[in-house]
Amino acid sequence: MLLLVTVLAVGTPVGKPLAAQRDVMRNTPAPMAETLAPDGALRFDAGRFTVVAFPTDERLARTVLRVAQERDSFPGLPRPTAQVLIAIAPDAERFRAWAGPSAPEWGAAVAFPALQRVVMQGSRAGSDAGSPIVTLRHELAHLALYEALGDVPPRWFDEGYASVSAGEWGREEALAASIGLAVRGVPTLEALELLFYRGASDAELAYALAHRAVADLMALDPDRGLSLFFVNWKATSSFELAVRQSFGVTSAGFEKSWQQQTRRRYGALALVANLSLAFGVFAVVIGPFIWQRRKRDRERLHALRVADAVQEEAQRQSMVEAMLAADASARDADIDSAAPRS
């Protein structure tokens, strides 16, 4: 009988991400939880994957199993060999029970690398859960990275690598609209690690920055990507040594380059986006008062123009009357001069 084991979450970032945020449960003991077999659960096996789901999610389970087999390799890593259990929860209540009470409320899926387990929401998940295939790929990348390197990678690399592996390039949209990026600038990699455990906006920014950091690291070797880096990282257990040996730069040099590139790519966009937002708020709050004042000014200007027109008409009329009076006087004078005199 299959057993699903849960562990405590390492941080619970919140916010509204590209699809649905995920978390990876590491470095904690795993207490036993309820079995997956009761209540008519179905089991599907193929290769190194086992998918457990209820009849309502049978179609999704078969798709998940097929995709997991077809895309069973990850950038720079040797092909994984560990047996993996993927549990598809039929509803939110079962997802919470299988993922454990400490799993994040917002999660569409949770990975347990030490157990080679993935728990994901089924077909009843909300629209914010995103594509289940992208979600699956993200979680399986966590498992593959753990199988190759264990607990060596820091959180920012773990999440960034899973995001790049799943092709979540849309995460970078968060960088172009980030108030934090516009105001505080790009953090160091050490500060990025802490950013995952703060509020909603900081966590969303952390996922996007981690994605960009791993993508930039991969770009340092266009031919081999991260393959040599992973070999050196596993051999030395040192990110600094692995970066030096693989790319010929120091970790500090890479960090500075990543910060500069990210700031150059997204800093101005973030500033413009937030200035636009501020202008929009200003327009909504102050706009009605400005509109009322402009309306009063238009009405006052119209009244002045009407008054000026009346005055001009009166002056014109007075001038016409004066000219007519002058003409009449001249005619009278001519008549008097022409009259016979006695």
Image (spheres, rainbow, N blue to C red):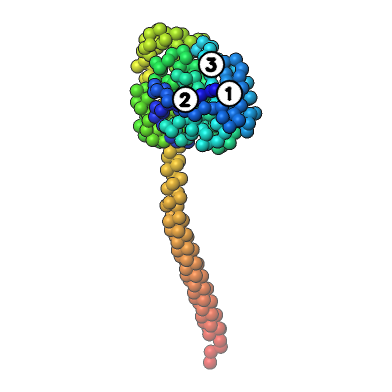
Q: Marks 1 and 2, how far apart in space?
A: 15 Å
Asked which secondary structure carries label 2, the reply is strand
Q: Earlier in the sequence, mark 3 or mark 1?
A: 1
In the visual, does 251 lie left or right of 134? left
Q: Position of residue 314 (x, y in %)?
A: 49, 72
Q: Residue furthest right?
A: 59
Residue at 38% in and 11% down: 237
Against 221, residue 301 (above or below) is below
Front tag of 3 and 2: 2
Asked which secondary structure carries label 3, the reply is loop
Q: Which mark is residue 51?
A: 1
Inspect the image, locate mark 1, and give the three-letter code of the amino acid beneath it: Val
The crowd level at tag 1 (other Cα within 10 Å; few <14, some 14-19, many 20+) is many
Say which quadrant the N terminus sits in: top right
Q: Residue furthest bottom?
A: 342
Asked which secondary structure carries label 1, the reply is strand
What residue is pinned by disc 2?
Answer: 5
Q: Which mark is residue 83?
A: 3
Instruction: Using the image as rendered, state which of residue 89 and residue 21 is in the foreground.
Output: 89
Residue at 45% in and 52% down: 287
Q: Earlier in the sequence, mark 3 or mark 2?
A: 2
Front tag of 1 and 2: 2
Inspect the image, locate mark 3, and give the three-letter code of the amino acid beneath it: Gln
Q: Marks 3 and 1, how far apart in space?
A: 11 Å
Instruction: Using the image as rendered, state which of residue 174 and residue 264 is in the foreground.
Output: 174
Inspect the image, locate mark 2, and give the three-letter code of the amino acid beneath it: Val
Q: Earlier in the sequence, mark 1 or mark 2?
A: 2
Q: Position of residue 253 (x, y in %)?
A: 36, 16
The crowd level at tag 2 (other Cα within 10 Å; few <14, some 14-19, many 20+) is some
Residue at 43% in and 13% down: 149
